[in-house]
Image (cartoon, helix red, strand yellow):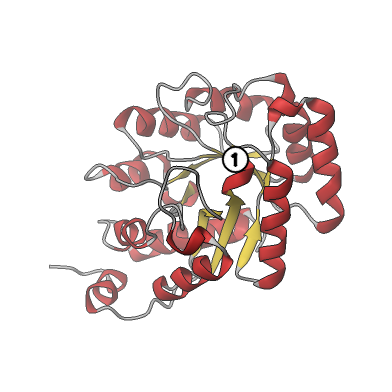
Amino acid sequence: MVTSQIAQKCLRGEPLEEYVVDAHCHLGPWHNFFVRRGGWADAVVEAMDRCGVTVSIIAAHVAVGPDEREGNNQVYRAAEAYPGRLVPYVTINPNRGTAAVEAEIARWEPHGIRAFKIHPSTHQYPVSGDNYRPMFEYAAAHALPVLSHTWAGDPNCSPPAFAQLAAQYPKAYFIIGHAASSWDAINAGCQAAVEYPNVYLDLCGSAMHYGALEYMVAQVGAERILHGSDNPFLDPRPPLGRVLMARITDDQKRLILGLNAKQLFQL
């Protein structure tokens, strides 16, 4: 028997009344993957409206690929077109060198930087590398979150590396992306989050093991787990449904769905 009021609404197909933040979204096409309607802002917001998502935090696909400057231009334009619905990540490419990283931060500082996005796997640069240092220092100075793609077994961005960064930059916030992608990732991410209060776990992914969310809540608490979908790279409905139908309390679901992110991103 389903006792959760949020889950019952989901089963009846009724609109959500909760404040929902999708903390892991993208913008634009990707070179070898189907993205509906090119993944541009209108398609992202249409999917948000269908799912009852209040706000999405977006990083451009081209920024996590070859051109972070153009990608950052795109997400700031999208945020201007949909104020209050889309919030930009500033994506950093460490392969440009520290001077270029500092210049990209300086370029967006007058416009307001809400968060950073990095993709050590695609950029093939370890998250512990020196070229990320200006970004981490800026994030710590301004108490900003940094979302990183992570993957268990990838030497550039395995979850245990973020425990070291959290210790080194205690005033920055580190979001371990795809933290529920495997049991190795889940256990490593939970260990980092238990040890360091500035580590958050991101549920974004195409699949999740049965019972994984309940396990993560039991280990870490619901207060540092974030909903994410990879919209428009992935269909945003299944990730949302995993939270709505999880065997946790409705208050815990509200935290994960949006209240944690509302506080973290200062929405």
Please tell me which residue is depicted at 27% across the width and 57% down the height of the picture.
246
Above or below: residue 267 compared with residue 202: below
> Furthest residue to the front?
31
Above or below: residue 169 compared with residue 262: above
> Furthest residue to the left?
1
* Residue 211 visible in the current orientation: yes
Figure quadrant of the N terminus? bottom left
From the top left corner, tell me how far across and down residue 89 is, in percent: 65, 50
Q: Which residue is mark 1?
A: 64
Please tell me which residue is depicted at 31% across the width and 81% down the height of the picture.
14
Closer to the camera in the image, 111 or 41: 41
What residue type is disc 1 on?
Val
Closer to the camera in the image, 15 or 198: 15
Crowding at dot 1, Cα within 10 Å, few <14 / some 14-19 / many 20+, comes out as many
As drawn, is 78 to the left or to the right of 225?
right
From the top left corner, tell me how far across and down residue 126 is, in percent: 59, 21
The answer to which quarter of the image holds residue 186 is top left
Above or below: residue 190 compared with residue 238: above
Closer to the camera in the image, 122 or 249: 122
**Tag 1 secondary structure:** helix
Please tell me which residue is depicted at 47% across the width and 34% down the height of the picture.
194
Closer to the camera in the image, 83 or 211: 83
From the top left corner, tell me how far across and down residue 64 is, in percent: 59, 40
As drawn, is 19 to the left or to the right of 145?
left
